[in-house]
Amino acid sequence: MSEATFFAEAPAEGGTSKRGFVLQTLRHQRVALGATVFLAACVLIAILAPWIAPYALHEQVGHVFGHPSWRHPLGLDDGGIDMVTLLIWGMRVSLVVGFAATFVSMVIGGAVGVVAGYFGGHTDNVLMRITDYFLVIPDVPLMIVVAAIWGPSLFHIIIVIGILLWTSTARVIRAQVKSVRERVYVKRVRALGAGHTRIVLRHVLPQVAPLLVASTVLTIAVAIFDETALAFLGLSDPSTVSLGTIMEHGFQRAAISTGKWWAIVWPGVLVTLLILACSLIGGALEDALNPRLRVAHLSARTFRLRPLVGRGKDAV
Amino acid sequence: MSAEPTLLEVEDLVVRYPINRGLVGSATRRPQRSVHAVEGVSLSLQRGEMLALVGESGCGKTTTAHAVLRLVDPVSGAIRFDGHNLVPLGPRELRPLRRRIQVVYQDPYESLDPRFRVRTAVEEPLLIHRLGGSRSERAARVREALVRVELSPPELYLDRYPHELSGGQRQRVAIAAALVLEPEVLVADEPVSMLDVSVRAGVLNVLDGLREQGLAILMITHDLSTAARFAQRIAVMYLGRIVEEGPAAAVVEDPQHPYTKALLSVVPRRDPRDRQRPQILKGETPDAVAIPSGCRFHPRCPVAVERCAAEDPELSQPVSTETGHRAACILLASQRVADCDEPHS
Amino acid sequence: MTTAPLLQIEDLHVWFELEDGGELHAVQGVNLSLEPGERLGLVGESGCGKTTTALAIMGLVPSSASVSGRVLLEGVDILAGGEEAIRPHRWADIAIVFQGAMNALNPVQTIGHQIVEVLELHQRAKGGAAKARTGELLEAVGIPAGRAARYPHELSGGMRQRAAIAMALSCNPKVLIADEPTTALDVMVQAQILELLDGLCQDFGLALILVTHDLPVVAQLCNRCAVMYAGEIVERGPLETIYHTPGHPYSRMLFAASPDLAGLDEPVLSIAGAPPRLDRPIDGCPFAPRCDSVFDACAVRPRLEQLAADHDAACHLNSRVPA
């Protein structure tokens, strides 16, 4: 009797090996789904800013620090400009800086992580020491120095943030690459004589990709935060409008002490929501990727299998 | 001995893994300790023959296989394949030879990339070695390989993912991926130990059939029953050395080395009435870092004498030179001498 | 024999909840009995339900699973009454040893400490007496008492398994369930552990349920055996009887599926196909698609029928009227 008609009818295994892992995870976890929708909406709004902003960006439409009203639901800023307009344009810049800086850090961090994890040995040691070196550089002083020497500009901020954020990605990717490298099917293909390029591109990267996505999203959160912080401290390009600069302007013009809270709170809330959304998505992906160490032992008291840590579904 | 050509010959292979001393250890020049995984192994493999390398965990059988595949670098010794010594060769020179020696691993659940369909997994070796001609020619080779491992009709399997297949089917796909390059030697590392009992025979019979078609197979296993049934020759390893070697039937029916005898006596038999007296050795196999002096088996050997702690025996030929049945035990040599002295009856 | 069996399992069913809302019927009406001092082998391949049965006997299945049936320990149904009712029986009456001791030993405590903890919690001994008893137990399983201060990771696989056995025996249970106790071990260590279990069962008068997929191991240690397939018992009886006159094709084919040193010229045949899914009801005999002797009666699901005294099998071939 041939085995032809008998396929293992067990339900397909889950895990990172299934295609579309990222999408699957996002769909199944409600919080991540909500966050994704929110982030997508923000990106869409930011892209369409020139068309959907209610007023022109530098058009003064009312008094300085005008109160929120029906025509201007979020109030006016220190130059009499509509807050909604500002937020839309500001979010655009914040997102652009966040994404661009993340892109820079992903490229560097991903490359370093893959090379260090794959080749190991001296290469690994050298790259990791370089990573450690970058880890200890403080970001704000570096930005101050860069702004002082080359002048503040968005481009500089992107580079600085990118240079500072790649290290954690590099470490995480390196660990994953090391473990994938030891998998039997990778060893098999190596024994076959496959070149490094082939192994990395076809076997290692696809396994590492979901982690890379998770790491990217989390880095975006940090990048947006970093940009906002740097802008708030006045180190960003003063000619561009980002959520951080809006807050900075408001702060400089004593919005808080005069009770004109809408000039600072709204951009702050929006930044917080953006960062929160990214963190939730990235966190959900990371959680789904974590192999649960099923280490348990028989409890002396109850004889049940007791997990080492935690209870119920969170047990490890 | 059969007149088949010897395809693979291993001579005095020594493989050691250094134990990491760390920065402090290196700085203070602590003596370098190593795991003596393989300490002087010699074997040969002929066309159409299956040699089973048998032993318990830590005996060095897997390391020997990895050395043959050049996945680890030996400290010394030679691995001759088709006249070439593989040991000093670099990756570029190895590549054409690698095609002719293939491997099948123990874990069918891990040896296939879960993202590749069967078609792609079996085709990949052809792409790596740039063989097989046009796309349709490659597809024909893939189909033929699947048929050879009895995954027939191949169309049913080509588009499946590994997780849709059973363990036995996955293992056959792994064998097909090894066969597609038409190797001369196949190294099978515990090919069925992770499969359910009821499907093992299928995979083993496939390997047996391939052997009859001319493939030489080096099978690593801890299961003496499987080795005895399917292999033509068996080599028993202990702590990095071969302690007994010879035709499968001879080793199993007339074991010479005390370790082989003990091992055979504890293999469970399926007939409940067949309760032979097992010779259960005390303790466990020692660490390969601290190898006993003299004969490495002597601390656990039931018939060890004083000389055994001092002398390290060679693989000699106690039984007959025709069959090549050899064992490494000093008691055998003296036994032979005693036998020779006695008048033949 | 008029004495009541030590352990009697009646009509045990276990269902697991599946993610998509369905149910997996992992154990489908298992009936077993165990006399004092008897060794019973529960044999089957992965997915047949043998481990789930062993866990269900002790009430160790996850809370998301549902269990029905009775488990009578010396006449008392320990499953009725939930967790509180069964808890006092664990360790003290029935104990379990798992494969590789991975699920028994706490990696962050020394083995001595763990055994002492069990003894103290179940009021078998306290303080110095507990330590002394721990030493005795370790010696009984072949671990030098000085090793009590070691952590599990410092011991070899064989030693860990012995430690798990010592822990299981600490409260003098009447029944020991061993779930694949030697599967991951080398053949020599396996022989040591089997010899140990043999000796302990004799010395302490233990009844043993050995759960394994390895028939020859059962042949070495047990006198009776129950073969499981697709969640139910398909054959049951003395091992010699099943080996020489199997009442079910699966038992016969399972014996023939592994090479044996005593019969090296015999062909070794695999059983084509795969076990059926247990999340759907099965029509007819669950083994029919893979059976080499299937005939028309097999469209009806067979029941366990007595073939001889103490030999039951669930196969229509046994009641087939010769043509």
Image: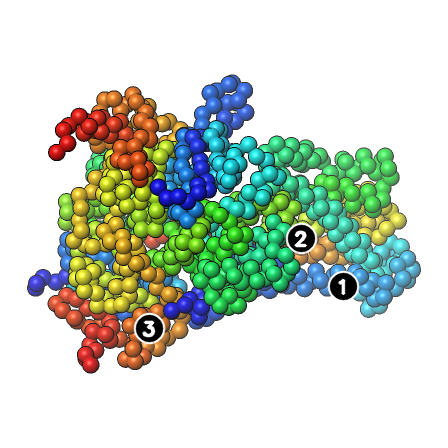
Write the residue at 13% across / 69% down: C308
Q: Is residue A138 visible?
A: yes
Mark sitting on residue C288: 3
Question: Left of A24 or right of it: where is C173?
Answer: left
Give how far apart the Cα atoms at labels 2 and 1 are. Answer: 17 Å
Label 2 sits on residue: A217
Which residue is at the front of the view, C131 or B229?
A: B229
Residue furthest left in the image: C2
Percent coordinates x, y for residue B212 in the rendering: 40, 54
**What chain does mark 1 sit on?**
A
- Name the image colouring: rainbow
Percent coordinates x, y for residue C11 in the rendering: 25, 69
Q: Secondary structure at mark 3?
A: helix
The residue mark sitting in front, 2 or 3, is 3
Q: Secondary structure at mark 2?
A: helix
**What chain does mark 2 sit on?**
A
Mark sitting on residue B158: none
Percent coordinates x, y for residue B113 in the rendering: 54, 54
Write the residue at 47% across / 60% down: B148
On the image, which quarter does residue C211 sit in? bottom left
Give how far apart the Cα atoms at labels 2 and 3 are. Answer: 53 Å
Mark sitting on residue A44: 1
Which kind of residue does numbered mark 1 sit on?
Leu
Percent coordinates x, y for residue A6 in the rendering: 43, 68
Write the residue at 18% across / 54% down: B272
